[in-house]
Image (cartoon, rainbow, N blue to C red):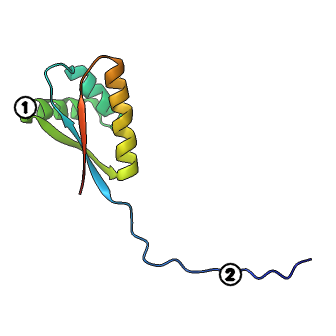
Amino acid sequence: MSDAELVVREIQDITPPKECKVIYVNDDVTSFEFVSESLVQYFNYEMKDAENRAVEIHEKGSSVVAILPFEIAEQRGVEVLVAARHQGYPLEIKLEQE
């Protein structure tokens, strides 16, 4: 049997992950329905809220749809873009650090 000693070091100065804005950019091709449904599917919006946000994106040209830790924001953005391209939509998503 070994007399190994367990060394535990306290970790200090842990910074939380940086928050990142997920921004949908309006275009003339991506359907209102796709935008609304992607907000429900990937960002857990209720349908009425998703429809309101889709109107805002259309009217203002872009809108922040979520603020998430960078890794999650990036992953969700990629998932939405893959779904958009699969359906032939040129939807653009930008990420901006808070």
Whether residue 9 is visible? yes
Residue at the far right: name it. Answer: 1
Query: Is 15 drawn above or below residue 61 in the view shown?
Result: below
Q: Amino acid at mark 1?
A: Glu
Q: Secondary structure at mark 2?
A: loop
- Between disc 2 and disc 1, the foreground one is 2
Q: Amino acid at mark 2?
A: Val
**Label annotation for residue 59:** 1
- Residue under numbered circle 2: 7
Q: Residue 81 in the image: state x and y as whole percent.
A: 33, 30
Q: CA distance from mark 2 to mark 1?
A: 59 Å
**In this picture, residue 53 sits left or right of residue 73:** left
Which of 57/95 is in front? 95
Query: Is 45 drawn above or below residue 20 in the view shown?
Result: above
Answer with mark 2 or mark 1, whichever residue precedes in sequence.
2
Q: Residue 40 in the image: state x and y as whole percent.
A: 32, 32
Rendered residue at 42%/77% (across/down): 13
Rendered residue at 22%/35% (across/down): 49
Are there few (<14), some (14-19), or many (20+) residues within 10 Å of tag 1?
few
**In this picture, residue 46 sits left or right of residue 58:** right
Q: Secondary structure at mark 1?
A: helix
Q: Residue 14 in the image: state x and y as whole percent.
A: 43, 72
